[in-house]
Amino acid sequence: MTMNLAHPTDLLGLVGQTVGTTGTLKIAQDQVNLFADATGDHQWIHTDPERAAHGPFGGTIAHGYLTLSLAPSILAEVLTVDGVHAALNYGLNKVRFPAPVPVGSALRVTVSVIAAQRKPAGIEAVFGLTYEIDGGTRPVCIADVVVLYT
């Protein structure tokens, strides 16, 4: 379910709260291959299913940065903010990849508001994203994503 805010200033009152959790996002080999083409990262653990089957993860895994790059679509799925000229990806405060994302995994992300403050250009919000896979014992990605709403 998507939370809808009437204005970016509404984020100021959501600090410390969970905004929502995405539906299931399936990670497919085609998606991983396209990301490898876009970034030039063709390491075999991502793109060679035959070799990866005998590797450390028992199959191919998604790039950590592919997992992270889903952040804008994740935020859009759980939160809409009206009264905005632009929502700018402003940066990251912290990112960790504690566990791999096997290709074929069902990924789900919980989003919370870590911080929000007024800036001269608008409202700067820091969202905590915790990515998990079905059957996983620990998160596969933890990221603090900064968005500037103007």
Image: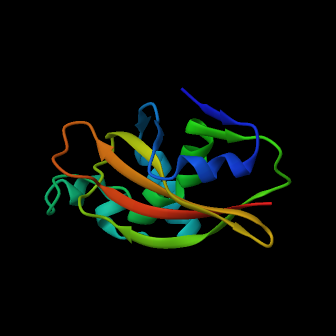
Q: State the residue at coordinates (86%, 54%).
A: 85
Q: Spot the residue most to the top.
A: 1
Rendered view: 142 above or below 103: below
Rendered view: 3 above or below 131: above
Q: State the residue at coordinates (36%, 70%).
A: 43
Task: Decide which of 62, 113 is in the foreground and name it.
Answer: 113
Q: Spot the residue most to the right.
A: 85
Rendered view: 27 above or below 122: above
Left of 46 or right of it: where is 75?
right
Q: State the residue at coordinates (62%, 53%).
A: 12
Q: Spot the residue most to the front.
A: 13
Where residue 53 sits in the image (x, y, percent)?
18, 53
Where residue 139 sits in the image (x, y, percent)?
27, 52
Picture quarter containing residue 140? bottom left
Task: Decide which of 85, 119 is in the foreground and name it.
Answer: 119
Task: Decide which of 96, 62 is in the foreground and name it.
Answer: 96
Where residue 78 sits in the image (x, y, percent)?
56, 37
